[in-house]
């Protein structure tokens, strides 16, 4: 059960940090929209956790397996450092959050095409 609490904490931190992007003013200029390697890693980690969480409603055993794999492969130190860096430059959160939304949206579109 250790991996559930660790993954849960990572998901909570990522979600909390993602929500903080809305704290910036809507008129802020995004000067550099390209993601760094660490920001891309954070996006991919968030999407992976979101997929596993969604899967838990459908196939609990497969979800457990995916969470166990994520627990052993996600670099939580790298994620925490990236979040810390992003909190130092809140405008970057907009770029990261938009990428997360696009990736989750593209996964939803692929999933809905596969169910038709």
Image: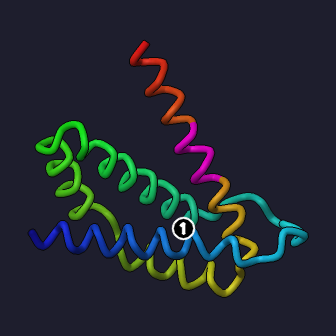
Residue at 62% over, 83% down: 87
Q: Say if the magenta span includes residue 104.
A: yes
Q: Position of residue 62 (x, y in %)?
A: 16, 41
Q: Secondary structure at mark 1?
A: helix
Q: Tell me, what colour scheme is on the image?
A: rainbow
Total label count?
Answer: 1
In this rendering, is residue 37 above or below 23?
A: above
Q: Quadrant of the N terminus?
A: bottom left
Return the residue found at the far top. 116
Q: Is residue 103 magenta?
A: yes
Categorize mark 1 by other alpha carbons within 10 Å: few (<14), some (14-19), many (20+). some
Which residue is painted at 54% across and 67% down in the image? 38
Residue 110 placement, left or right of 75: right
**Residue 106 sits in quarter:** top right
Kindly identify the residue that appears in the image at 57 percent across and 39 percent down. Answer: 105
Q: Main secondary structure of the magenta part?
A: helix
State the image coordinates of residue 39 (x, y, percent, origin top left): 57, 65
**Percent coordinates x, y for residue 5 in the rendering:** 21, 73
Q: Position of residue 25 (x, y in %)?
A: 83, 75
Quadrant location of residue 11? bottom left
- Stretch of the chain drawn in magenta: 99-105
In the image, taking residue 59 as reference, residue 94 lies left or right, namely right
- Which residue has dot 1 on it? 38
Q: Quadrant of the C terminus?
A: top left
Tell whether 27 sits left or right of 35.
Answer: right
62 vs 85, nearest the viewer: 62
Residue occupying the point 11% across, 43% down: 61
Q: Residue furthest front?
A: 57
């Amino acid at each position: 059960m250790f991996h559930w609490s660790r993954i849960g904490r990572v998901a909570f931190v990522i979600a909390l940090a993602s929500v903080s992007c809305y704290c910036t003013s809507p008129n802020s200029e995004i000067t550099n929209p390209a993601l760094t390697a660490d920001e891309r890693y954070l996006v991919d980690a968030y999407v992976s956790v979101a997929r596993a969480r969604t899967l838990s409603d459908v196939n609990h055993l497969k979800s457990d397996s995916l969470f166990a794999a994520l627990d052993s492969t996600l670099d939580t130190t790298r994620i925490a450092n990236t979040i810390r860096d992003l909190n130092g430059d809140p405008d970057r959160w907009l770029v990261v959050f938009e990428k997360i939304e696009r990736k989750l949206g593209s996964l939803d579109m692929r999933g809905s095409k596969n169910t038709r």
